[in-house]
Image: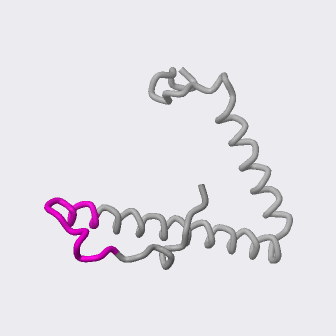
């Protein structure tokens, strides 16, 4: 599914309003805001990564490697899915 930009969403006519519709409209507005915030966060992360690669390439590579290793550990079948269910480490 391809996400459309918020500007591509056509406004609804006044005839579309019915009891309870205001709640739906408010929920849609909140969802749109959350989506826009998430989109901005992803753009910000990419900007910071690009800047770090330019300014500190060695540190950038080390961080990317750390991300890969953590992601692999989290996908491991040995990793407990419920962190609270495991025994505390070192005991």
Dominant SS in magenta: helix
The answer to if 23 sits in the magenta stretch is: yes
When the figure is inspected, residue 41 is found, relative to residue 13, above or below; the finding is above
Place of residue 34 in the rendered image (x, y in percent of width and height, measured from the top left): 43, 64
Q: Residue at x 20, y 66 (%)?
A: 22
Place of residue 28 in the rendered image (x, y in percent of width and height, measured from the top left): 35, 64
**Left or right: 86 in relation to 78:** left
Q: Residue at x 69, y 34 (%)?
A: 73
Place of residue 18 in the rendered image (x, y in percent of width and height, measured from the top left): 17, 64
Furthest residue in direction front, as rendered: 15
In the rendered view of the protein, which quadrant contains the N terminus? Answer: bottom right
**Left or right: 85 in relation to 19:** right
**86 or 9: which is nearer to us?**
9
**60 or 81: which is nearer to us?**
81
Q: Quadrant of residue 53?
A: bottom right
The answer to if 55 sits in the magenta stretch is: no
When the figure is inspected, residue 37 is found, relative to residue 71, above or below; the finding is below
Q: Residue at x 52, y 64 (%)?
A: 38
Q: Which residues are magenta?
A: 12-26
Place of residue 11 in the rendered image (x, y in percent of width and height, measured from the top left): 37, 77
When the figure is inspected, residue 91 is found, relative to residue 58, above or below; the finding is above
**66 or 90: which is nearer to us?**
66
**Left or right: 49 in relation to 17:** right
């Amino acid at each position: 599914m391809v996400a459309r930009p918020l500007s591509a969403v056509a406004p609804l006519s006044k005839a579309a309003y019915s009891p309870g519709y205001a709640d739906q409209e408010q929920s849609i507005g909140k969802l749109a805001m959350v989506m826009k915030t998430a989109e901005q966060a992803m753009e910000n992360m990419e900007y910071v990564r690009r800047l770090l690669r330019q300014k500190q390439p060695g540190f950038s590579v080390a961080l990317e490697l750390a991300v890969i290793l953590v992601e692999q550990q989290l996908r491991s079948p040995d990793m407990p899915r419920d962190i609270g269910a495991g025994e505390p480490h070192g005991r």
